[in-house]
Image (cartoon, rainbow, N blue to C red):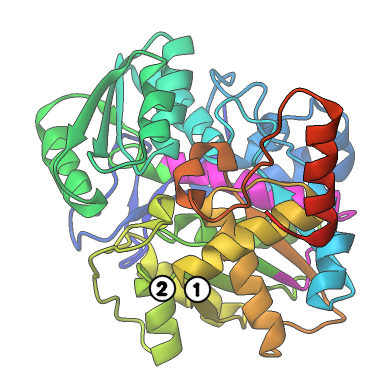
Amino acid sequence: MGYVRGLKCRECGREYPVSPIYVCEFCFGPLEVIYDYKSIKKALTRKVIEKREKSLWRYKELLPIDGAPLAGLNSGYTPLLKADNLAKELGVKELYIKDDTVAHPTLSFKDRVVAVAITKAREFGFDTVACASTGNLAHSVSAHGAKAGFNRFIFIPATLEASKIVASLIYEPNLIAVDGNYDEVNRLCSEIANKYKWAFVNINIRPFYAEGSKTHGFEIVEQLGWNAPDNVVIPSASGSLLTKIWKSFKEFKEIGIIKELKTRVFAAQATGCSPITTAIKQGTDVIRPVKPNTIAKSLAIGNPADGYYAIQVVAEAGGTGEDVSDQEIIDGIKLLARTEGIFAETAGGVTVAVTKKLIDSGKIGRDEITVICVTGNGLKTQEALTGHTVSPYFIKPHISSFEEALDKMKRGDQ
């Protein structure tokens, strides 16, 4: 058995037994998993973790499952790369990239949350999993659900990048492209979830699903030699990843894995969909929904479910929020690729560009340890870079043609 005590309403504090529910029946607040930390402290130590397989399940006592993991056995423990070239370019002493573009079956951090959701769906006895998605979650549910033998229903905005649609279809789920943005897709899925007995990973399984994001934070601490960083810059769509990374740091402190926690948390969004960072900069905790208009489609949630809680975390952790334009996102993608050889999707361009902005404005100190969270692979969003990269040199198949091109390269001609 696991170490979960039950579910608790984030608003009124009312507790519930473990079941596939996600809102409080009294105040309609969101539910969150609560744990028996006293028992976990006795069972989970640095030495125990270090002896385990390098996957997200090395922290299983702090994840909401009862039995053996069903999915994500090869997911997690992605690299934390010391980004010396990028640090030099940005003028800081110590900078790291938490690189979730690799070491996941579908090349994004969503494999973390889906591993937990799929396992929990099976424990609850479901035979069908479903989701509303801006792309990465669709890939992950399609892939992990296929391997685990589930029926799968995937709902996406019809305007999603073609490459992201193909990356779901290859696993042969039931893919439904909805004529609307993500918020409209999500509202439809809430209605469907109330009528059909399916495990919607980001609706009725959401309290359990969201806990998988904590592994991103657990790994950062472990890979920094069991220390929390001074700063962490996190892409924000629903706001859930940000709240769970902060929860992971606090849990490690609660059970004695780390002794102090002085990390500042920074929310990063695209200007074309920035309800969380706009509220932070305006000094309010009221989220004003927006209609997304950005190339960062994986972050294009105009009415973020965890936005209010993300604002609270940023305030608690002494951070702030910042957003960047589409051109800055493209520049961020190219900067990371040029300096560190990492091809990030648009969400990664957001965090890199926001980090640059925060450093330039003095909100992140140049002598501090900063981690940038890069959550998905750039091969998923190549369309965003169309017309924004240099062109290849076209030559004939003989050396004179090559040397003509070489002269152009030396002159800087294209």
Is 369 on the left or on the right of 316, as rendered? Answer: right
* 229 part of magenta stretch: yes
Please state the extent of the stretch shown in magenta in the rendering: 208-231
Q: Farthest residue in the top direction? A: 149
For disc 2, the neighbor class at 10 Å (few under 14, some 14 to 19, many from 20) is: many
* CB-based contact (under 8 Å), mark 2 and mark 1: yes
Give the secondary structure at mark 1.
strand
Q: Amino acid under label 2?
A: Thr
**Among the 4 quarters of the image, the one containing residue 276:** bottom left
Q: Name the residue rendered at 65%, 57% in the picture.
A: 334
- Where does label 1 land, which residue? 324
Q: Amino acid under label 1?
A: Val
Give the secondary structure at mark 2.
loop
State the quadrant of the N terminus.
top right
What's the mark number on residue 271? 2
Q: Position of residue 13 (x, y in %)?
A: 36, 63
Q: Name the residue rendered at 35%, 23% in the picture.
A: 124
Is 197 on the left or on the right of 387, as rendered? Answer: left
* 81 part of magenta stretch: no
Determine if residue 334 is in view: yes
Give the mark, 2 or 1, whose residue is nearer the N terminus: 2
Is 374 on the left or on the right of 413, as rendered? Answer: left
Q: Is residue 369 above or below residue 305?
A: below
Alpha-carbon distance for marks 2 and 1?
A: 5 Å
Q: Farthest residue in the front direction? A: 400
Q: Name the residue rendered at 70%, 61% in the picture.
A: 335
